[in-house]
Amino acid sequence: MWFTILHDHSELLLPWGVVIGASLCAAVTDARARRIPNLLTLPLVASGWIRAGAACGVAGFGDSLAATLVLAAPFVLLFAFGGGGAGDAKLMGGIGAWLGVVDGFVTLLAVCLAGMVLGVAFAAWKKRLGAVLANLTGAAYGFLQRSLPAVDDGQKLPYGIAISAGTVVAAGFTWIWRTRTS
């Protein structure tokens, strides 16, 4: 029953509205200041857990908590290995807290695809596309070779933009999918 309540059409507007709004704010602050503030991400996580628990009890809270961990995990790994920011991980955790595992996973896939597209566009804009493609080619063969040029010139894509774009795409896809299947 909790799954039906969380994923009912009438209940979709609030969580998607919250995560789209939060991701748009994060994209703007990340593009301007190169950070996503805790003042945005931590209340997003906490309010998502509270909403899920209030709407669906322990099962809803469990779904929200699981989605927080699933969506944040890849970004925590990126942060740990120096390729991403902690704000990205917390934002994804907050998105998971509001959307639950099913919609959260769709969002995670859309964010990853948006990140790839925006990453290639960003590299081309910074005139680093050749180095990025060389590194990707090396990675496809197993390991980066030491002779390949380093891509890190201190210019990193503000990933909040990719998170926002992926969230909007996932919302549209989910809305279309749910309205066609009901």
Image: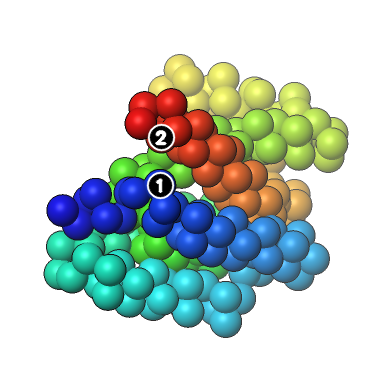
Reading the image, the residue beneath label 2 is 178
Residue type at numbered disc 2: Arg
What's the colour scheme? rainbow
Q: Is residue 71 left or right of residue 175?
A: left
Q: Quadrant of the C terminus?
A: top left
Reading the image, the residue beneath label 1 is 9
Q: Which mark is residue 59?
A: none
Question: How far from the left and from the top, in percent, is residue 68?
Answer: 34, 61
Residue type at numbered disc 1: His
User: Label 1's element?
Assistant: helix
Task: Determine if residue 77 is in view.
Answer: no
Task: Determine if residue 126 is in view.
Answer: yes
Bin the neighbour count of mark 1 within 10 Å (Cα to Cα): few under 14, some 14-19, many 20 and up.
Answer: few
Q: Residue at coordinates 59% horizontally, 65% vertically from top-left?
A: 22
78, 174: nearer the viewer: 174
User: Label 2's element?
Assistant: helix
Question: How far from the left and from the top, in percent, is residue 36?
Answer: 62, 69
Callout 2 touching callout 1 (CB < 8 Å): yes
Q: Name the image quarter holding residue 128.
A: top right
Sequence-earlier tag: 2 or 1: 1
Q: Residue at coordinates 52% horizontally, 43% vertically from top-left?
A: 171
Q: Give the alpha-carbon distance from disc 2 to disc 1, as whole Å.
A: 8 Å
Count the marks: how many? 2
Question: How far from the left and from the top, in percent, is residue 48?
Answer: 39, 69
82, 2: nearer the viewer: 2
Question: How far from the left and from the top, in percent, is residue 45?
Answer: 41, 72
Q: Residue at coordinates 49% horizontally, 38% vertically from top-left?
A: 175
Q: Name the image quarter holding residue 38.
A: bottom right
Q: Residue at coordinates 47% horizontally, 72% vertically from top-left?
A: 44
Bin the neighbour count of mark 2 within 10 Å (Cα to Cα): few under 14, some 14-19, many 20 and up.
Answer: some
